[in-house]
Amino acid sequence: MEMLARVTIRGAKLFRGNLDGKDIDSGKIFVDVELKGENSWGICTQELKCEGSQLVESVRHNPFPFTAEIGMQEMSNGKVSTKVVTMIKPLQRVAEEKAPKAG
């Protein structure tokens, strides 16, 4: 299943290299997620896997955080479902809110 989402991307990381004889090409983005529940409030970040490091490399030049439209593909082996980001389209930079000074 493919889906589109509008998210705030707070950070990203990538890895290209060889570990224990295996070539690895991976990327991840970290997006805002709203906390819900009786004893939680605000936002936290959630890690989303990307289909490769090239996708993360393509948005590296953007000032973080920024809003983006992302494409995701959800796959399952019948027991476990995973989501993989397949597209990132930057939209605009997010202005950071300053916390009020204690006084």
Image (spheres, helix red, strand yellow):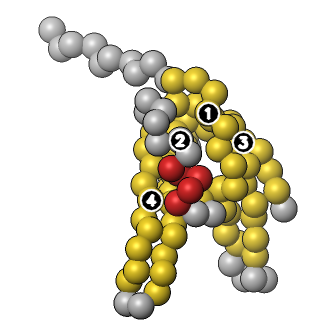
Q: Position of residue 67 (x, y in %)?
A: 58, 31
Q: Is residue 94 above or below residue 100?
A: below
Question: Could you tell me which residue is drawn at 50 percent across and 23 percent down?
Answer: 94
Q: Nearer the viewer, mark 4 or mark 3?
A: 4
Q: Position of residue 33 (x, y in %)?
A: 55, 43
Q: Position of residue 88 (x, y in %)?
A: 65, 44
Name the side, left or right, on which 79 lies relative to 44. Answer: right
What label sits on residue 59 in the rendered view?
Answer: 2
- Crowding around mark 4 (Cα neighbors within 10 Å: few <14, some 14 to 19, many 20+) is some
Query: Are dots 1 and 2 in contact, CB under 8 Å?
Result: yes
- Crowding around mark 2 (Cα neighbors within 10 Å: few <14, some 14 to 19, many 20+) is some
Name the side, left or right, on which 52 lies relative to 6. Answer: left
Question: Could you tell me which residue is drawn at 58 percent across and 23 percent down?
Answer: 92
Mark pair 3, 2: CA separation = 16 Å
The residue at which mark 3 appears reads as 5
Question: Could you tell me which residue is drawn at 30 percent across and 19 percent down?
Answer: 99
Which residue is nearer to you in this view: 42 or 37? 42
Which of the two discs, 4 and 3, labels the residue nearer the N terminus?
3
The residue at which mark 4 appears reads as 14
Q: Residue placed farthest to the top in the image?
A: 103
Mark pair 1, 2: CA separation = 7 Å
Which of the two discs, 3 and 2, labels the residue nearer the N terminus?
3
Q: Nearer the viewer, mark 3 or mark 1?
A: 1
- Crowding around mark 3 (Cα neighbors within 10 Å: few <14, some 14 to 19, many 20+) is few
Query: Are dots 3 and 1 in contact, CB under 8 Å?
Result: no
Mark pair 4, 3: CA separation = 21 Å
Mark 1 falls on what kind of element?
A: strand
Query: Are dots 4 and 1 in contact, CB under 8 Å?
Result: no
Dot 1 amino acid type: Pro
Mark 4 falls on what kind of element?
A: strand
